[in-house]
Amino acid sequence: MSLSETMSSDRDPFRIPQAGIEVAPLAGLASIDLNANGGSFSGGEFVTESTLGGVVVYAIYQALLTGLRTEALRKRGAINRAVQIQMIAFTVWESVKQGAAVSLLLGVVLLVFPWLAFPLSVLGLVGMGKASLDLFHAFWDGLDELQRAELLAAAMEAGVNLRRFLDGDQPGIQAV
C-alpha cells in the first residue's frame, strides 16, 4: 500500500477543512491594538480589540487551509483558479463569522474572569499543534508523488521522520 493510499483513507483530499475549536483559544487571546495605547483591559476596548484579533486569526488560518487544499484540487484538474478563489473567499467569510462569535464570547469571558488567560494560552498551544498538523496535511495533499518522494528523501537526509506526521508511525506502512 502506498503512502498516498494510506493518507486518502484517513483524510478526504477533496473535503475543505473548516477552522474549528483548535484555533478558538488562540483567537480568544489574540488582540489587535487599534489605537496604539498599549492595550487596555477596560470593557469595550478590550472586547473590540480581542474580537478583531480573533477574527484575523480565524481568517488567516482558514485562508491557509482552503488555499492549500484547493491548490491540490486545482492541480488535479478538479477545479479552475476562479473556482478556487471563490471557495477561499466563501470559506474565509464563513470562518470570519464563526471567529467573530467565538472571539467576542471569549473576550467577554476574559474580561469577567481574567485568570482564565493562562489556561486558555495552554489550550492555545495544544490547538496550534493540531492546526499545524492540519496545515501540513493540506500541504502534503497538494503535492504529487514525485514531490512527496523528494520531500521525504530531503527530510530523511536532514534526520527528520515525516512518516510520524503522515501515518502515525505505524509499522508496516511504506513511505513510498
Image: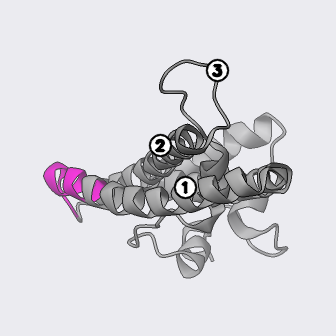
Residue ID for mark 3: 38
Q: Which element carries disc 1, helix, strand or loop? A: helix
- Residue segment shown in magenta: 79-88
Identity, as a three-letter code, of the amino acid under mark 2 = Leu
Q: Which element carries disc 2, helix, strand or loop? A: helix
Mark 3 and mark 1 lie on one chain; the one further toward the N terminus is: 3
Asked if one can make out residue 176 in the rendered structure from this viewpoint, the answer is no
> As rendered, which of 59 and 97 lies closer to the eye?
97
Res. 122 mark: none
> Height in image: 90 above or below 45?
below
Instruction: Residue 102: give x, y in percent of width and height.
Output: 54, 62
The quadrant of the rendering that contains the C terminus is bottom right
Q: Which element carries disc 3, helix, strand or loop? A: loop
Identity, as a three-letter code, of the amino acid under mark 3 = Gly
Identity, as a three-letter code, of the amino acid under mark 1 = Ser
Residue ID for mark 1: 103
Q: Main secondary structure of the magenta part?
A: helix
Residue depicted at 59% across the width and 59% down the height? 134
Mark 2 and mark 3 lie on one chain; the one further toward the N terminus is: 3
Q: Residues within 10 Å of mark 3 (few under 14, many from 20)?
A: few
User: CA gap, disc 3 to disc 1?
Assistant: 20 Å
Residue ID for mark 2: 52
Instruction: Residue 171: give x, y in percent of width and height.
Output: 85, 73
> Height in image: 28 above or below 15?
above
Label 1–label 2 contact, CB within 8 A:
yes
Label 3–label 1 contact, CB within 8 A:
no
Quarter of the figure with residue 158:
top right
